[in-house]
Image (cartoon, rainbow, N blue to C red):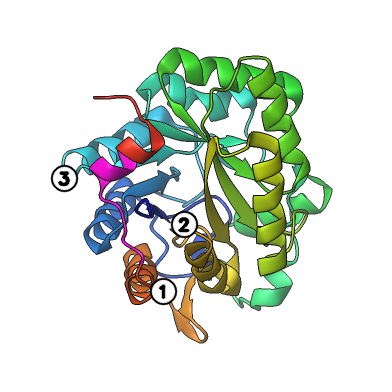
Amino acid sequence: MAKTIVTAATTGAIHTPSMSPHLPVTPEQIADHAVGAWEAGAAVVHIHARDPKTGKPTSDMSVFGDILGRIRSRCDVVICATTGGGLGMTVDERLMVVSTFKPELASFNAGSINFGLFDIPSRMNIREWKHEWEVPYLEMTKDYIFCNTFKSLEAFARVFEQCGTKPEAEVYDSGMLNNLAYLVDRGLLKKPVYVQFVLGIMGGLPATVENLMFLLQTAKRTFGSDFAWSVCAAGRFQMPLCTAGLLLGGNVRVGMEDSLWLEKGVPAASSAEQVAKIVRIARELGVETATPAEARAILGLRQT
């Protein structure tokens, strides 16, 4: 059986600085968390950029360049750059990281979704928010669509192809597999497709083992055996769903983008802690995890 790729998503664009003192914000912090995840066993790190002063997600290429340069100077981990960006960013802003830095791997959101974060302030019961942007950023998602139309999907696919960047297709619901099939049929995406099942986002499929199996079976009917897959899940569902992913023969993603917790009642101090935990679980299940070099071979990434 092929080795399993562990991805660490270090900061994302969902959680805000007031939610955790451990959330990395500056380029140095994000790079440190990425390198720590690599040391713990991650073969891939998924990278978002944030304004170093406010912690707000940013598409500033100088910040991205700082983060990527720091990581590349310290380890050989595969870097998966986000093209999800931050909520409300334009297509051009989201794509800029691919055309500028030509990463080996980048996220490719496979369809539109109601991306709801508006309930977080009431659920987290934070008394004092650190920055003025945080609550409005979350509450605006009550009337927000994370928009990925067929026109923009085609534009993304062309830029990825031109830059030699492998798409990691983020799939939040089963219809998005049909969107990917359309792009494959048009010659805009190449097989084997790499699919990241993202479960537990309000507006997408709930994080259940049944839904993971449903997506996996749908992908098999859509692409045959010509695809690879991974799973990540929001909040408390991170470890249970990733454990199910290991048992089903898939790759897994953990990290503070998806969950701020290591276990019930225990905040995660870093994505490295979460990586170490899923690597231990994999080992106990007899699943070998991949090195960055092995992950590059498994995913067919370009030779650098």
Tell me the element at label 3: loop
Q: Position of residue 65 (x, y in %)?
A: 32, 32
Residue for badge 3:
74
How many residues crowd mark 1 within 10 Å: few (<14), some (14–19), many (20+)? many
Q: Is residue 292 shown in magenta?
A: yes
Q: Is residue 291 shown in magenta?
A: yes
> In the displayed structure, does residue 143 sit left or right of residue 47?
right
Q: Are marks 1 and 3 in contact (CB under 8 Å)?
A: no
- Can residue 145 be seen here? The reply is no
Q: Which mark is residue 69?
A: none
Residue at 66% x, 78% y: name it. Answer: 125
Residue for badge 1:
268
In the image, residue 299 sits, relative to residue 36, either above or below, namely above
In the image, residue 281 sits, relative to residue 145, either above or below, namely below
Q: Relative to the observer, which residue lies in front, 141 or 72?
A: 72
In the image, residue 200 sits, relative to residue 185, either above or below, namely below
Q: Which residues lie in the magenta part?
A: 287-296
Residue at 49% x, 55% y: name it. Answer: 250
**Quarter of the image with the N terminus in it:** bottom left
Please tell me whether mark 2 or mark 1 is closer to you in this view. 2
Tell me the quarter of the picture where residue 276 sits: bottom left
